[in-house]
Image (cartoon, rainbow, N blue to C red):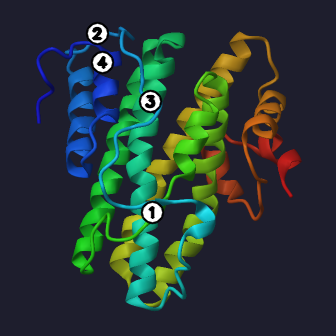
Amino acid sequence: MMLPIAIDSVGAACAHVLLTPHPVAKLMSARAVARAWRHGRLEARFDAAMPDRPARPDAPELLPPNRMPKRGKIGSDRARIAMLHALAHIEFVAIDLAFDLIGRFGGQFPVAFIDQWMQVGAEEAMHFALLDRRLRQMGSHYGALPAHDGLWQAAEETATDALARLAIVPMVLEARALDITPATVERFASVGDHASARMLCRIMADEIRHVSAGTTWFTWATNRLGLDSPKHYQILVKQHFRGALKPPFNASARRQAGLTEEFYAALAT
């Protein structure tokens, strides 16, 4: 897929991804934007406003988290499909989160920030494609079940502060995925769904790098401002995150991502 010829800036390209509603078209747009940046076809201009909300397809129906149906035990096909659908929705929203981060805040960072988050956006698109393909192999598809909108609520909460966005999205929400994915992999493997288990392991390896990107640029920005990175992280999480950081933590994966215990231990409940 090629971008429209009129799109020649990073800002316009990121807005294009967010304003593309159809899942397949969005992932293709994400890949096209990342490729265009990599090949030097986009200028580092931030001349387009990011939408308050991305365009969304007619399905899935978006529900508040407390209205989401219970998934049940992982041993049934229905429960595994529900889990994979929930993960597919997270990756679908993560495409928009990556490109919104670039388009909204990229001008505050070096060009290397754009390089890294373009790669993240392309990988989120790949993750969504993997999960949707697995759903189809199991007789379902993305959009067949309802989903919740909590991830984009975090984006709305941090829409005016780059440090808050980095603290909450990669360093809280994506870091939480590092904590829970190994147990999810074990549950899929325990019922013989090794295809899904392998896929989730592959996705988790990428997510460690995504959390690392958040930690790297959060630390870069706080150091530049003369702030103590862990302490400022704790302040921002208390201000912007609705909920608690719940152990157990995957300390090994978090350390690989540079998210050491000095950041989050004081916030644990």
Query: Label 1 crowding class (10 Å Cα cut-off): few <14, some 14-19, many 20+?
Result: some
- Amino acid type of the residue tagged 3 in the rendering: Asp
* Secondary structure under the numbered disc 1 in the rendered image: helix
Q: Position of residue 119 (x, y in %)?
A: 36, 34
Q: Which residue is mark 3?
A: 100
Query: If you read the primary sequence from the N terminus, does the residue marked by circle 2 or circle 1 appear first?
Result: 2
Q: Which circle, 3 or 2, is nearer the viewer? A: 3
Q: Between disc 4 and disc 1, whose residue precedes?
A: 4
Could you say which quadrant of the image residue 233 lies in? Answer: top right
The dot on residue 12 is 4
| Label total for image | 4
The label shown at residue 23 is: none
Disc 4 from disc 3: Cα separation: 11 Å
Above or below 18: residue 106: above
Label 3 crowd (10 A; few <14 / some 14-19 / many >=20): many
Label ID, residue 43: 2
Q: CA distance from mark 2 to mark 1?
A: 33 Å
- Helix, strand or loop at mark 4: helix
Residue 51 in view of the camera? yes
The Cα–Cα distance between marks 3 and 2, rounded to whole angstroms, is: 17 Å
What residue did someone put label 1 on?
A: 87
Q: How far apart are the two marked residues, 4 and 2, measured between alpha carbons?
A: 10 Å
For the residue marked with disc 4, what is the amino acid?
Ala
